[in-house]
Image (spheres, rainbow, N blue to C red):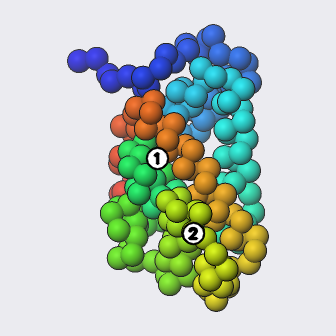
Amino acid sequence: MTSPAVSRFPVPPLAEMPDDIRSRIEGVQEKSGFVPNVFLALAARPDEFRAFFAYHDALMEKDSGLSKAEREMIVVATSAANQCQYCVVAHGAILRIRAKNPLIADQIATNYRKADITPRQRAMLDFAMKVSREAETVGDSDFDALKAHGFTDDDIWDITAVAAFFALSNRMANVTAMRPNDEFYLMGRLPKA
């Protein structure tokens, strides 16, 4: 049986990728044991690859008032609303690992309002969903609700930026038919032996 395509678009062979992109992909492979398909699917457009991952890293890896797990919660909740299989599966795996909770990603992807999260995290996800689905309706009352839970202006910017960036990512993954790697499905579900 042939494995399904990574994307609807051609994926360049690793040997033909620019050195910096090939090096990044090899580093990810060394760390995780596989190459997430998003790296392969975006490698066909080197300048866009670099811009995408530079912004991704700026949002998802920096020190922030939001934990890395909370940022992944935003990705999973908004990606589920945008019906992005790739991001729900891939970032669900990352969320399970970062939250050290094998249940949380499925709960958030299905219905974050019923997930085992704090009221602060629910307010964060309520706002992220609004940014992702109806940003034109965001107003002062939304900021007031977040500030009542202790979010700062920087935190609100971060919630907004993560939701907005992954709205782009969701649309690209959906149009390209980006396939989640099989490895993601089991990650973070069972304790390590």
- Decide if residue 174 is on the left or right side of residue 24: left
* Number of other residues with Cα within 10 Å of mark 2, as a class: few under 14, some 14 to 19, many 20 or more: few
- Can you identify the residue that label 1 sits on? 87
User: Is any atom of residue 164 visible in this view?
Assistant: yes
In this view of the protein, which residue sits in the foreground, 117 or 143? 143
In the picture as drawn, the residue positioned furthest to the front comes out as 136
| Disc 1 and disc 2 in contact, CB within 8 angstroms | no
In this view of the protein, which residue sits in the foreground, 178 or 33? 178
Q: Position of residue 118 (x, y in %)?
A: 49, 82
* Number of other residues with Cα within 10 Å of mark 1, as a class: few under 14, some 14 to 19, many 20 or more: many
In this view of the protein, which residue sits in the foreground, 94 or 4? 4
Q: Position of residue 24 (x, y in %)?
A: 67, 30
What's under tag 1, amino acid-wise? Cys
What's under tag 2, amino acid-wise? Thr
Identify whether 156 is placed above or below 181: below
In this view of the protein, which residue sits in the foreground, 100 or 64? 64
Q: Position of residue 168 (x, y in %)?
A: 57, 44
Write the residue at 52% across / 27% down.
41
Q: Which disc is residue 137 wearing? A: 2
The part of the image, by quadrant, that contains residue 27 is top right
- Decide if residue 136 is on the left or right side of residue 119: right
Instruction: Identify the secondary structure beneath mark 2.
Output: helix
Give the foreground label among 1 and 2: 2
In the picture as drawn, the residue positioned furthest to the bottom comes out as 148
